[in-house]
Image (tube, rainbow, N blue to C red):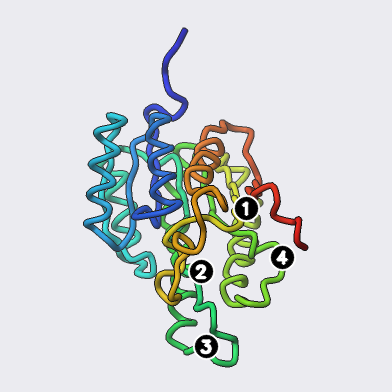
Amino acid sequence: MSTKRPLAEKTAFITGASSGIGEATAEALAVQGADVALVARRESKLESIAERIEAETEQTALVLPTDVTDSDAVRDAVERTVDTFGQLDVLVNNAGIATGSDVTVETMPAEQYRTVMGVNVDGMFFVTQAAIPHLRETSGIAVFVASFAGQYPRPGAPIYAATKWWTRGFAHSLAGSLGADEIGVTVINPSEVRTEFGKEYRDQVSEDRYEPNEVTEPDAIGDAVAFAAQQEPPNVVSEMDLYRRDKFSNF
């Protein structure tokens, strides 16, 4: 019986890889045999994650400190990945930040608005734009981490929700334009996840708000991404919702 792992000899590029969903995704992809490029701003965090991945999986983890809102830095990171590994097979567009929980549209500072839009929208565009030519060469897959907030109205976070509606619309439209090139596009919609998410503009992050197993854990999202990444042409997972089972019980 073959023991070859499903993603052996493939390369994945993961944004927001320094914690939470991005970190768990990098680990899940490496377990399945992929070499991984870890992209985020916090170099020291990336270094420790890379060291752990290489020790536990024997895959190579490339550390790429990058601000996804800088288009030139993004392009350099993608090119370094391809130069190092020879190819790019899986893109995971995960980097994102939340708006402040007590900020309304009327009170939101312009700086906060531009920062959130810059990471969640512009960053996702810049990364995708740089990766497409390389994904075309490998018939690769682009995975977009969207959100429950991009499917249902979120009165308390309209700007953040709008960025996730944009993510889904961009990804599905991209699927229509790239499908003939055998590039797969997957959208994954988590509900609440216990991570560091929200640290930029909130007093309390989701990691502290929720007890273990009270909401979805990052590992579950990482496993979902790994499943999507294993799909071979002509098939693709178009969209996957990953909610806890009691999500709608109080609606």
On the picture, is 183 further left or further right than 235?
left
Three-letter amino acid code of the residue under disc 3: Met
Label 2 element class = helix
- Quarter where residue 56 is shown: top left
Label 3 element class = loop
Pointer 2: what residue? 121
Label 1 element class = helix
Work out whether residue 95 or residue 195 is closer to the camera in this orientation and state it.
195
Q: Mark 3 and mark 1: span between their CA atoms?
A: 35 Å
Q: Nearer the viewer, mark 2 or mark 4?
A: 4
Q: Please say if the residues under marks 2 and 4 sit with CB atoms less than 8 Å apart.
A: no
Work out whether residue 178 or residue 27 is closer to the camera in this orientation and state it.
27
The earlier-in-sequence mark between 1 and 2 is 2
Pointer 1: what residue? 177
Pointer 3: what residue? 108
Pointer 4: what residue? 152
Asked if 74 appears above or below 78 in the picture, the reply is below
Residue 149 visible in this rendered orientation of the protein: yes
The earlier-in-sequence mark between 3 and 2 is 3
Residue 125 visible in this rendered orientation of the protein: no
